């Protein structure tokens, strides 16, 4: 049986809506931690990339421009969650680390998201979630390939 969509790229529109609703849900659930969407996204991506990542690597991971990221990093730094350290190998580059308070905040985010994950994925068996994840990864890889080919 062939996969068909009621209109071209309907599935991509569904991805976008789902992503937006999930991001809004996460923002609502971490609001008690005084975190905006931009702040929790930076912290999560920092945790995924590992401490000591550069601002440039983080900007690429988030797919945002450096000025937007710099503003959010300054806010997190002012709040005492992260610190920037000049890279000894490249004085123009800043490495990002969580402060002890930031590590505690990250633990709070992770436990909030663990509970939220159970609710968001309710009623979906692990094998179906794994299939969706594999399909999304393939679609992402195809999109990246097409973007690179169009340059």
Image (cartoon, grey):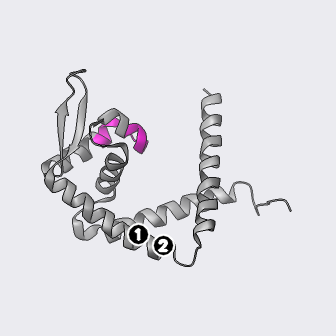
Judge left or right: residue 13 versus residue 74.
right
Foreground mark, 2 or 1, reads 2
Q: Nearer the viewer, residue 100 or 67?
A: 100
How crowded pointer 2 is (Cα within 10 Å; few <14, some 14-19, many 20+) is rated as few
Instruction: Bin the neighbour count of mark 1 within 10 Å (Cα to Cα): few under 14, some 14-19, many 20 and up.
Output: some
Q: How many marks?
A: 2
Which of these two is toward me, 141 or 34?
141
Decide which of tag 2 and tag 1 comes sooner along the chain.
1
* Residue 100 on image: x %, y %: 14, 53
Question: Can residue 79 be seen?
Answer: no
Residue 140 picture location, percent across and down: 59, 46
Q: Is residue 55 magenta?
A: no
Image quarter hosting the C terminus: top right
Q: What's the mark number on residue 120?
A: 2
Secondary element under disc 1, as helix, strand or loop, is helix
Helix, strand or loop for the magenta stretch, by majority: helix
Residue indicated by mark 1? 25
Which percent across, then down, holds residue 17? 54, 63
Q: In this orientation, does residue 105 appear? A: yes
Does residue 98 lie above or below 40 as drawn? above
* Magenta stretch, residue numbers: 59-69
Mark 2–mark 1 contact, CB under 8 Å? yes
* Figure quadrant of residue 105: bottom left
Residue 28 spot, x, y in % from top left: 34, 70
Q: How far is disc 2 from disc 1 in space, using C-alphas?
A: 9 Å
Camera-nearest residue between 124 and 7: 124
């Amino acid at each position: 049986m062939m996969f068909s969509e009621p209109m071209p790229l309907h599935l991509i529109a569904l991805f976008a809506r789902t992503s937006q609703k999930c991001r809004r849900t996460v923002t609502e659930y971490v609001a008690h931690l005084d975190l905006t969407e931009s702040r929790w996204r930076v912290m999560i991506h920092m945790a995924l990339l590992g401490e000591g990542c550069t601002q440039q690597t983080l900007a690429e991971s988030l797919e945002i421009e450096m000025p937007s990221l710099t503003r959010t990093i300054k806010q997190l730094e002012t709040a005492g969650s992260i610190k920037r350290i000049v890279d000894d190998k490249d004085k123009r580059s800043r490495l990002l680390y969580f402060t002890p308070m930031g590590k505690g905040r990250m633990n709070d985010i992770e436990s909030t998201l663990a509970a939220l994950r159970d609710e968001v994925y309710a009623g979906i068996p692990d094998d179906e979630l794994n299939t969706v994840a594999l399909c999304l990864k393939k679609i992402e890889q195809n999109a990246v390939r097409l973007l690179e080919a169009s340059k």
